[in-house]
Image (tube, rainbow, N blue to C red):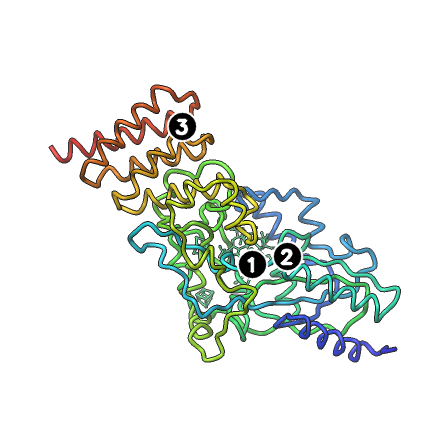
């Protein structure tokens, strides 16, 4: 029986690394009081967009003892998804759509959730009577605040936790436990005068002090339900899911990605059906079976098929490639208004292309207007047809 907190900790850290975690730190189970205030203030200002965080949910996320009565420690983990593969250029011409590097491999919730449960089983076996609750992402915790307090890394101005070892290319996860363990010290590090991510965010979503306006963040736009605001669609470029820009421009990350130690963990390497980018036409026209086969194992499936098709339509609309027009015309017949409306927008955006396809697009949009009953889709079609008229006048 191991009893001293430092010995217990060593034993647990060793086991955690055996299981697969790259970094492990410990903090106590005190409430995250300051984070709770920041969290509530941001929710009240609408900065968290679609993410519904009523006060009681925020309080639970910031008070570990509300999640696990008797909690004394939080074991914080970070797992690298640093990759030898470079993220696909989100503004590259052509018909391929960029998949964010956190999403192109196996769903991290399942992998890391499984590892956390293994660690919990180890603790409850080694220390009978102790209890644990595993948290990852959608779980009830402020993942980043916990990791920072446990000395795993520091807050970057892009809100991500930066680690010395892997930059911000890490997934975070925690075990809240009743076991008493020696806490680690937070790191005394920050971004200094760098503002690269703030300057280079394509939609200006990063405010001072790691404050993200999720309403403008492309990662959020590609994950939300419903229509993407028109004024933000162009900035999405060819992105099919997520956005890596504030991470790829970060000098801390750049050093990690180019270092000799950069390696891809097999769990998070791009899946063969996904790669770092996908053929947008295939995604737009995919069947339910294809959706399950391609996206089922990844963290992109949770919003369903229509959201990915919507994203593919927007990305094709940004492609400036007339080859995108025929599949978009076909998508005007999609069962889901969400897909029809964004396909109409995309066709409007492609009116600048010349050639026979453009006339076909106009005819298809007019035909849709004649039969469409959904008000929002009708509006999108009307606006797309206006684009065509504007283009014609400019060309006359
Ligand atoms: C909702 C959510 C989102 C939303 C909103 C994110 C946001 N920043 O508001 C959207 C969809 C936009 C999103 C996007 C992404 N997400 Co996300 N997301 C979450 C989730 C579920 C909750 C985050 C949240 O709202 N926290 C509450 C807010 C208030 O906390 P915060 O944003 O961390 O803000 C803190 C700082 O501002 C800090 N702070 C206060 N004062 C100051 C002062 C200074 C100077 C600084 C620097 C900081 C600072 O205090 C605040 C409170 O702790 C977490 C998982 C979880 N359960 O925590 C994952 C999580 C944060 N996401 C993650 C990832 C990977 C991403 C993406 C990189 C995915 C992608 N490539 O598209 C992007 C990154 C976008 C970005 N720059 O933040 C990882 C982050 C890993 C890491 N290394 O940090 C997490 C932890 C999931 C996980 N378990 O691994 N995400
Ligand atoms: S994920 Fe993209 S859009 Fe969101 S804050 Fe970072 S750079 Fe900006
Ligand atoms: S780009 Fe600069 S400011 Fe932004 S997180 Fe990286 S080091 Fe910090």
Q: Residues within 10 Å of mark 1 (few under 14, many from 20)?
A: many
Answer above or below: position of 8 versus 326: below
Name the residue: 60% across, 61% down: 144
In the figure, residue 357 lies in which quadrant? top left
Q: Secondary structure at mark 3?
A: helix
In which quadrant is the N terminus drawn? bottom right
- Where is residue 112? Give x, y as percent: 64, 62
Kindly report which numbered mark, 1 or 3, lies closer to the viewer in this rendering.
1
In which quadrant is the C terminus drawn? top left
Q: Secondary structure at mark 2?
A: helix
Q: Which mark is residue 164?
A: none
389 on left or right of 165: left
Name the residue: 52% across, 72% down: 166
- Where is residue 21? Give x, y as percent: 64, 70
Circle nearer the N terminus (3, 2): 2
Say if mark 2 contacts mark 1, CB within 8 Å: yes
Q: Which residue is mark 1?
A: 106
Depth check: give the residue in front, 308 or 246. 308
Give the image quadrant in which the ligand numbered 1 is located.
Answer: bottom right
- Where is residue 72? Give x, y as percent: 79, 64
Q: Which mark is residue 110?
A: 2
Circle nearer the N terminus (1, 3): 1
User: Marks 1/3: CA distance?
Assistant: 35 Å
Depth check: give the residue in front, 244 or 365. 365
Name the residue: 79% across, 80% down: 7
Q: Which residue is mark 3?
A: 377
């Amino acid at each position: 029986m191991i009893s001293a907190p430092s010995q217990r900790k060593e034993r647990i850290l060793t086991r955690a690394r055996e299981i697969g975690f790259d970094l492990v730190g410990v903090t106590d189970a005190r409430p995250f009081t300051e984070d709770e205030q920041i969290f509530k203030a941001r929710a009240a200002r609408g900065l968290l967009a679609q993410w519904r965080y009523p006060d009681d949910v925020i309080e639970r996320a910031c008070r570990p003892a509300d999640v696990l009565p008797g909690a004394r420690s939080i074991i914080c983990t970070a797992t690298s998804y640093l990759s030898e593969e470079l993220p696909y250029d989100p503004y590259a011409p052509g018909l391929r759509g960029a998949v964010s590097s956190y999403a192109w491999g196996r769903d991290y919730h399942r992998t890391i959730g499984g590892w956390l449960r293994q660690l919990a089983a180890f603790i409850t076996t080694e220390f009978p009577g102790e209890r644990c609750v595993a948290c990852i992402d959608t779980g009830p915790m402020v993942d980043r605040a916990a990791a920072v307090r446990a000395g795993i890394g520091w807050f970057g101005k892009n809100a991500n936790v930066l680690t010395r070892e892997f930059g911000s290319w890490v997934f975070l996860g925690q075990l809240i436990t009743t076991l008493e363990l020696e806490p680690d010290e937070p790191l005394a590090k920050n971004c200094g005068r760098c503002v690269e991510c703030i300057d280079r965010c394509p939609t200006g979503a990063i405010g001072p002090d790691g404050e993200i306006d999720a309403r403008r963040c492309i990662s959020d736009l590609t994950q939300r339900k419903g229509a993407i605001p028109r004024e933000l669609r162009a900035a999405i470029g060819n992105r099919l899911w997520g956005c890596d820009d504030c991470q790829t421009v970060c000098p801390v990350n750049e050093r990690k990605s180019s270092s000799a130690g950069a390696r891809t963990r097999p769990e998070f390497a791009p899946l063969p059906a996904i790669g770092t980018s996908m053929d947008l036409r295939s995604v737009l026209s995919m069947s339910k079976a294809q959706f399950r086969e391609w996206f089922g194992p990844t963290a992109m499936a949770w919003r369903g098929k229509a959201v990915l098709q919507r994203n593919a339509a927007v990305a094709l609309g940004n492609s400036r490639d007339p080859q995108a027009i025929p599949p978009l015309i076909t998508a005007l017949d999609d069962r889901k208004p969400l897909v029809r409306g964004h396909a109409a927008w995309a066709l409007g955006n492609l009116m600048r292309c010349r050639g026979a396809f453009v006339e076909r697009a106009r005819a298809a949009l007019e035909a849709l207007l004649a039969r469409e009953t959904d008000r929002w889709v009708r509006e999108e079609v009307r606006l797309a047809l206006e684009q065509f008229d504007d283009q014609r006048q400019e060309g006359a």
